[in-house]
Image (spheres, grey):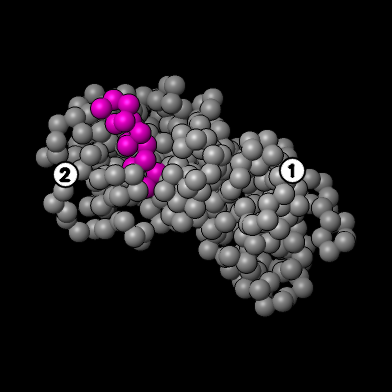
Amino acid sequence: MDDKMTADIQDRPPIAWCADIGGSFIKFGRIFAAGDVAVDAQVPTPVAVWDDFVAALAQLTAGGAAGLPLAISVAGLYDAASGQIAAANIPCFAGHDVPGELSAALQRPVLIANDADSFALAEAVVGAGRGHKVVFGAILGTGVGGGLVIDGKLLQGLHGIAGEWGHGPILPQVVKVDGVDTAVPQFDCGCGLHGCLDPIGSARGIERLHQHYHGKALTSFEILDAWEAGDADAARTVGVWAQVLGGPLAFVMNALGASIVPVGGGLANRPTLLAALDDVVRQGTLNRFAAPVVVQAQHRSDAGLIGVSVLAVQHLAVTG
């Protein structure tokens, strides 16, 4: 758990509530400042019935100061214009203006960002990207996602898709690994497109690549352990993976003018893997960086709550 996060009861009054909502649990707490959060409860997420979901949040916020904002990080694609959230694992969101209806029911302002955006905001303002003008936060875990922060402000874009670099037909047909041209397999993506990064760039993607090239069904942990131990097959798999992701990520940095890419998700727990990706990325950026730009995120645990704490502070700075 991050240094400023604690589960004990504190005497000082919070400035806002916070919640990290996933398909299994709601993690709930209080915000004292940007990056300063106390986690108070974790309860099952009522995913099927909207009224049950509202009731759960009403119970969590009961007894707090009237009108105290609630800042929410949620797994899913959030469209700020309509308030709609597309989350396959939380079907009760469908058809609802989530912040609008929650605000009316709970009698308090409700702020929302999706989990990738919350992560990016946490890293940009109180994490590894602090002090950088343009920060692109990348998620490499069960999928490939991201978020964009410019001058400390989250940019969500049309229908909330800004930062979704894992989708779109961007896969190269061939990459060069150790001087050898290597064909890149193209997979159908869950988004409905073909040739996205998401099916290859994730931990599961490393497994797909290894199965494709070597006919071996290993877990990503086994493949990466073998690579770090000097296994030639694993080295080829990781080499392709780094080239496939590194080119598009360098393009993202060039297009946005980003100067740092904090990485979260399960693959961020492998510093050697991030170093391999960083090497490819820096070969493709127009700006020549002397230091690594693809870096391990500071807030790999509870990044959602940390991110929406920043969102809440920014909201209060405007509304008072």
- Residue lying at 76% horizontally and 52% vertically, measured from the top left: 283
Q: Nearer the viewer, residue 212 or 161?
A: 161
The image position of residue 2, as x and y in percent, is 36, 59
Instruction: Name the side, left or right, on which 108 lies relative to 64.
Output: right
Q: Nearer the viewer, residue 35 or 240?
A: 35
Under mark 1, the amino acid is Leu
Q: Main secondary structure of the magenta part?
A: helix
Position of 250 relative to 108 (above/below): below
- Residue lying at 52% horizontally and 35% vertically, measured from the top left: 150
Please tell me whether mark 1 or mark 2 is closer to you in this view.
1
The image position of residue 166, as x and y in percent, is 62, 42
Position of 229 relative to 191 (above/below): below
On the question of residue 243 being in view, the answer is: yes
**Disc 1 target residue:** 286
Residue 312, magenta (yes or no)? yes
On the question of residue 145 being in view, the answer is: no
Residue 163, magenta (yes or no)? no
The image position of residue 37, as x and y in percent, is 29, 50
CA neighbours of label 1 inside 10 A, class few (<14), some (14 to 19), many (20+): few
* Count of marks, rendered view: 2
Instruction: Name the side, left or right, on which 41 lies relative to 156.
Output: left
Quadrant occupied by the C terminus: top left
- Residue lying at 79% horizontally and 52% vertically, measured from the top left: 184
The image position of residue 165, as x and y in percent, is 62, 40
Toward which corner of the image does residue 161 lie, by quadrant? Answer: top right
Q: Which residues are magenta?
A: 306-320
- Which residue reaches farthest bottom? 229
Q: Secondary structure at mark 1?
A: loop
**Disc 2 target residue:** 13
